Image: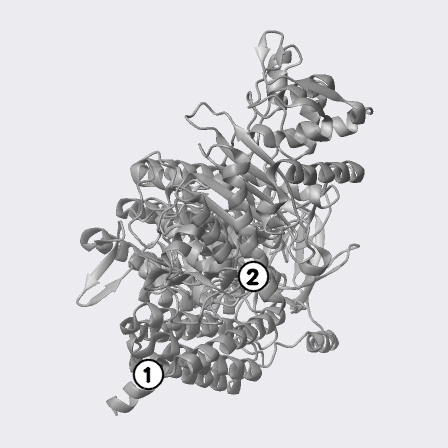
Amino acid sequence: MRKQERRAVICLLLAFILFAGVVLFGSRFIRDGGKWASFYGNSQIYTDGRINRGTVSDRNGEVLLECTRDGFFYNDDYETRRATVHAVGDPGGNIASGAINVFKSQLIGYDILNGTYDNSSQGKKIRLTIDAEANVAAYEALGGRTGTVGVYNYKTGEIMCMVSTPTFDPADSLPDADDGEGYYFNNFLDGKITPGSTFKLVTATAVIDNIADRDSYTFDCDGENEYEGTDFTDIRSHGEVSFKSALAQSCNGAFGELTREVGAKTMQEYAEKAGLTEPVDVNGIKTAAGSFDFPEDDNIKLSWAGIGQADDLVNPCAMMVYMGAIANEGEAVQPTLIKSATFLREITGGKSLGRYLEKDTAAELRSMMKNNVVENYGEENFDGIDIYAKSGTAETGGYNPDAWFVGFTDDVDAPYAFVVWVKDGGHGSEVAAPIARSVIRTLEANAESDDM
Amino acid sequence: MESILYRLLNMAETYPEIAKEMTTVMRWFFVVLAAYILLVSIISLLTTRCTPEIWGYFLVENGGNYPITHWENVVGRSRSADINIPLRTISNNHAIINRRDDEKWIIKDLGSHNGTVVNGFKLVPNKRYLISTGDEIVMGGVHCTLAPASVEESRNNEKMRRLDKEPVAPWKILLAITLFQVLTIVQLIIGMGTDITAGALICIVLLSVVMWAYVTFFKAMGSRGFEMEMIAFFISTINLAVTASWNPGNTVKQFVAMMMGLSLMIFMCIYMRELERTRKLKPMLIGLSVILLLLNLALGTVKYGAANWIQIGGLSIQPSEIVKLAFVFVGAGTLEELYQKNSTIMYAAFAFFCLACLAIMGDFGTALIFFATYLIVSFLRSGDLSRMILTFVGAALMGLMILRFKPYIASRFAVWGHVWDFADNEGYQQTRTMSFGAGGGLLGLGAGNGQLKYVGASSTDLVFGFVMEEWGFIIAVLLVLCIITLTIFSVMNIVAGRSTFYTICACSAATMFLVQTILNVFGAVDLFPLTGVTFPFLSTGGTSMLASWAMLAFFKAADMRQSASLAVRKEA
């Protein structure tokens, strides 16, 4: 009998295999349960391949999408649907960064305790940070042109407005994904675009930090600004400009020379410090990352790269975050699309991404951006908004250049950083600036009504 | 009457909010009750300490005084001998001393080098001789005697045994299961609405009644240990709920199979109280199995890819499930038999026959269960060279089988470990199991609310996922722990086991349950290729339910706690 007793250990071994397998499965269940439950084959939460529960609304509670067992129901307003579709997502799941894709598990409301059991019987609600009215304002201002508008609160990180065009009506028949028009492409999150003169803000940052006698800097702009056989043409001759007015006039000649003075290595370093070479994480969505080439052995190309041309590519969202950093005394705040249920964020601010600029540098840049508005764009064009900005007119080889307008407002109740890009739009401050103004006006109006 | 019932069943649809609230709350009750029922039973089984009973003493001159704690004992120099005499003239396994049902003793020389002499008579090796206490036994020149346990010692013994932990009283557990069953009926009405049938609900009530009757009757008859039955009744309750959710019409059939299994278990328990008559069943069971399997080969119908069913009238049975019981019996043996070659050869031949039949039927999963059981039991029996040979034979068989099923098995193995990449073809069942299963969370969605039931084989091969979805991860895992507990309990009880026959039976049955559970659970959640095997007590299917209950008799027969088990005769 004792022999059998010893040999019976093999049965315990088998029992242990079963136990170990269940433990292994348990750990996978804890780790991947949400993913498994959200699988499209789960008919508890999908009807005909579409999520059948949950609602997506904007920051003010305006319902943008309702998912039911009878299908998807988008907002009643045609323009709202078109202006918010890239944030909300389309029924076909073509917009990868749409809320119904990215926040699927929140919509399903999976948690490990209840699984997909729906306590509320009405489904989960996702509140986005965007303001549907501001989105509509941006959509209207874009006027059918291709482009993007992004605005976020640089204190809390909440993205207030995110519009990308061309757009479409998700309640209507969906456009073909392969037609090359890019309906499903979110320019704000996924775009990589030539920044043009808006990049001079990065060059200016490098200059502030690295050229001590910048206050005595002058450049004589003759409109052609020939350097080693290449012209760094400006629309007109700016005459003798200082560093400050070179930025205000967006003088290519001066910034070409300043770039060369700063040097290729430092330029690369400042593009990285500005967060423009890494993807931005927006609630788990990774934006496209910008890319640059500052050659050490090619001064011509280096000069072009310093004024936002050559191989420069930026992501609009990253650019917006950089604007926020300048506004927020150098510290960047991570953008978010999900409205936090608590007021904590309002008090403590959003999650910091760290220091992008020194405090003094940010202050100097800030005053230069104000000067841009005063000296060039005209404060009277902004209805009294306390705005700080830089325009851009990027040559991309099209019939018209791309129009850019980036910057921020200084208002305790409405601290917004923004980015506007209109493809083939023309001159930056003429085309893109009014769009920014229109959206910010809408947001400020809504912020005021919030307070009441 | 019918309209009252209909209105009652329609309640959930009339008041969806109230129904929802009830389910929300009841899910907690289910988990708490299940945890109570199963953990109390499991802990009671695992904390038993069996004081081996002393049947007599083996006295060795100038040596010592060895208590005899089993009915079957090996005397020898081997360290694992039950009576271990470390003298060089004694062979490793010198002789066997057995206590018979009628309290007489038997000695048998195992072909030792120096032989055994009793009262001056030299024993012929491998022949049994009756001996009495006081007889002079000389083994390799060493003088020994068998002494009876003294009255005083018997009394001490008795005291020791009284100190043993008693099995947990069944009443609270019974109440908890009954409450669970009542709530299950309520939840099925909420979850299924008018789709549920009165028959399905009545089956759950009847199960409850039978459970109370069984415990009350056998408690009155003097049995004290009911943990294993409690576990079986509990899992059977879940089985009825699963069947009712999956296909309410099948519940009655399932219940009938349960009752047949319970009856067979009671019969087996009582029959197995006496070793001699139990042993004599072997040839009959072999004959019966051969007939059943041959019938299956001749008349088998193909269901789910394997021809392992016989259709008799409106009844379809799975002969291989019943042969499992015979397989356990044939593999077991008394200590004497373990030293007999023909017993070993008979087992090997029977195993070969069964595996060959299963191979022809194409029932890969069951073949794997038989094969694993065969390997483990062979090891328990021999533990040495012959095992190696037997394993080799087995492995060769396995190779043949794999060749036979190649295309079918190859595709199962191909997706193993990455079923999500084949979610809509070869990995369909596993991905659904995991997805719906995870959807159940820890508490489950409530009986009747699941949707895995619309996937093929959900209530059999994928039943683990079915339970995860409707009853939650906690209950599903508790059920697996129950199977593990039965195994540990069997192994723990070997210390006090009467005969290797019973201990091997229990280990063999435990191995079958374990391998079944491993294949069922691992297959459904992609830890192993899907083989299509049932979970004991849990999967729907009449024959498998009947066999699970009957198999319980083997565990009952190994329960050596004092007057605990129905399968062990009370001492006077």
Chain of residue at mark 2: A
Q: Position of residue B200 (x, y in %)?
A: 32, 78
Callout 1: 10 Å neighbours few (<14), some, many (20+)? many
Callout 2: 10 Å neighbours few (<14), some, many (20+)? some
What sort of colour scheme is used for the picture? one colour
| Residue situated furthest top in the rendering | A229
Quarter of the figure that contains the N terminus of chain A: bottom right
Q: Does the image show residue B333?
A: no
Q: CA distance from mark 1 to mark 2?
A: 52 Å
Q: Name the residue beneath numbered marker 1.
A: B9
Q: Position of residue A307 (x, y in %)?
A: 61, 24
Q: Does the image show residue B55?
A: yes
The kind of residue on which mark 1 rests is Leu
Q: Name the residue beneath numbered marker 2.
A: A446
Query: Closer to the camera, B153 or A278?
Result: A278
Above or below, A143 against B501 in this view is above
Q: Position of residue B217 (x, y in %)?
A: 47, 86
Residue B60 is tagged as none
Above or below, B87 against A75 in this view is above
Quarter of the figure that contains the C terminus of chain A: bottom right
